[in-house]
Image (cartoon, grey):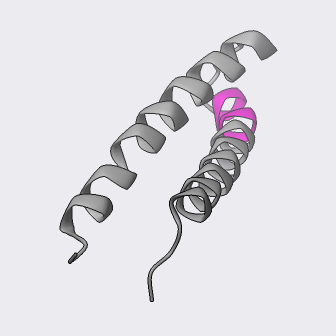
Amino acid sequence: MNQSRSLFVFKAAVIGVLGWLVALATQALIFPVLGMQVMIWQHLTVSGVVTALFFLRRPAPRRSLRPN
């Protein structure tokens, strides 16, 4: 089944947003346990960078390995 490019991008974006929320929640729970006190903007920056890297890296192999 072929999936349109827009559907592919939408699904990747949803996965990216969910990943960002999980990263943010994990940091908010784990950092204090480790004695790390960070500001909310630092949480947003770290989780955003990690999620962006995941989002940029993830779709490329799937698209390039898909048979034509």
Residue 46 x, y percent position in the rendering: 57, 21
What residue do we see at 20% from left, 77% from top? 67
Quarter of the image where one finds residue 11: bottom right
Quarter of the image where one finds residue 30: top right
Quarter of the image where one finds residue 7: bottom right
Asked if residue 48 is positioned above or below residue 54 in the image, the reply reads above
Residue 58 x, y percent position in the rendering: 38, 51
What residue do we see at 38% from left, 53% from top? 59
Q: In the image, is 31 to the left or to the right of 1?
A: right
What residue do we see at 56% from left, 55% from top? 12
Q: In the image, is 36 to the left or to the right of 1?
A: right
Tally the marks.
0
Q: Is residue 54 magenta?
A: no
Residue 36 x, y percent position in the rendering: 64, 18
Magenta segment boundaries in residue numbering: 27-33
Q: In the rendered view of the protein, which quadrant contains the N terminus?
A: bottom left
Q: In the rendered view of the protein, which quadrant contains the C terminus?
A: bottom left
**Farthest residue toward the bottom?**
1
Asked if residue 41 is positioned above or below residue 55 in the image, the reply reads above
Q: Nearer the viewer, residue 4 or 29?
A: 4
Residue 64 x, y percent position in the rendering: 22, 59
- Per the picture, the main secondary structure of the magenta-coloured stretch is helix
Is any part of residue 25 visible from this angle?
yes
What residue do we see at 70% from left, 36% from top? 24
Q: Nearer the viewer, residue 15 or 67?
A: 67
Asked if residue 16 is positioned above or below residue 61 in the image, the reply reads above
**Farthest residue toward the right?**
40
Is any part of residue 39 visible from this angle?
no
Asked if residue 12 is positioned above or below residue 29 in the image, the reply reads below
